[in-house]
Amino acid sequence: MGDPAGIGPEVTVKALSDSRISKLAHFLVIGDFFIIDKVRKILRTGSEMSLMDLANVRTTNFSFGIKKPAFGRAAMEYIDKALILLKAGEADALVTAPINKSSIRSAGFEDFEGHTEYLAHMSGAGEFAMMFVGKRLKITLCTRHISLRDVPLAITSDLVYRTIKLTHEYLRVYFGIRSPKIAVAGLNPHASENGLFGDEEERIIIPAVRKASAGIKNIYGPLPADVIFYKALEGEFDAVVAMYHDQALAPFKTLYFNDGVNLTLGLPFIRTSPDHGTAFDIAGKGIADPASMKEAIILASRLCSPRHS
């Protein structure tokens, strides 16, 4: 259910109260009964759901919308319990509600980077990546949550190549696209325009595209970021490989702010999440939009099907 003080519990209850969602699979919510019950009362709903109650949130002086080490610790306990169930084969997929990195780090997890990195580390995943999925656009990230000034140093030809390869593999495995068309974004304006605005394209991205193209068909780029997403929306490409977080998320959230989905590639299990944060400013008010959580659940359920239909 994510951070107890965020909107995770609310969007979880709202999504699973929708009969169109609840019939898709057998769902188990990992969280705290006290919080879920509190949300039900706010929403004035008596909807029932299967809940694994870890009872790890103190009922005294609880408030929504605040950062607190105890809430970060509770959120991590939900994740760890989910990993145990997944490893034991008792669950087929994981949908994670939003967490708060500050609360988690203050709880003693000082090196915590995010859900994606933690799940990959704990499950022993070698290659992994974040893909954002909308109805007409899929984007995979080469780098994730790092400072913009660190991006040029973090991008290597091997990283770009591995991200292209992972994207290609999961477009086939998860989405049934036999021969995916993948476009790779440049780092600099106009993809450097033949070296006028930087040399990362020539030194790093072009060699990666050439290496990928030697074994995979239909890899294009590097293309300027100001045209690549439009072309993907028009159907020219099945996915875009972006160099850094906001290069991808600015256009993606402009289009799919309420219903985009974060899909992790490379894990030994299916994992999706809503494309939003804890939204502490509206937590506990009953006004959170569950659309992204619903889409995350729908995608996870669909990917559990052998045919991914």
Image: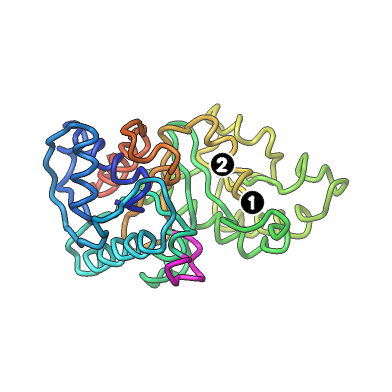
Q: Residue at x 34, y 59 (%)?
A: 75
Instruction: Indicate the quadrant where residue 125 lies.
Output: bottom left
Looking at this rendering, what residue extends furthest in the front direction? Answer: 61
Q: Residue at x 40, y 49 (%)?
A: 172
Task: Locate residue 165 relative to residue 282 in the image: left or right.
Answer: right
For marks 2 and 1, the one nearer the N-term is 1
Q: Residue at x 23, y 33 (%)?
A: 43
Q: Residues within 10 Å of mark 1 (few under 14, many from 20)?
A: many
Instruction: Indicate the quadrant where residue 199 lies.
Output: bottom right
Task: Locate residue 267, reporting x and y percent.
Answer: 38, 62
Look at the magenta stretch and give its main secondary structure. loop
Looking at this rendering, what residue extends furthest in the right direction? Answer: 196
Disc 2 versus disc 1: nearer the observer: 2
Q: 298 or 16: nearer the eye?
A: 16
Task: Locate residue 283 relative to residue 101 in the image: left or right.
Answer: left
In the rendered image, the vertical position of residue 259 relative to residue 300, given as above or below: above
Q: CA distance from mark 2 to mark 1?
A: 11 Å
**Residue 193 can be seen, yes or no:** yes
What secondary structure is marked by label 1?
loop
Task: Locate residue 234, reporting x and y percent.
Answer: 55, 27
Q: Amino acid at mark 1?
A: Met
What secondary structure is marked by label 2?
helix
Q: Residues within 10 Å of mark 2 (few under 14, many from 20)?
A: some
Q: 189 or 14: nearer the eye?
A: 14
Highlighted range, magenta = 105-114
Residue 18 part of the magenta-drawn span: no
Q: 74 or 142: nearer the eye?
A: 74
Query: Which disc is residue 243 wearing?
Result: 1
Residue identified by numbered label 2? 249
Q: Are marks 2 and 1 in contact (CB under 8 Å)?
A: no
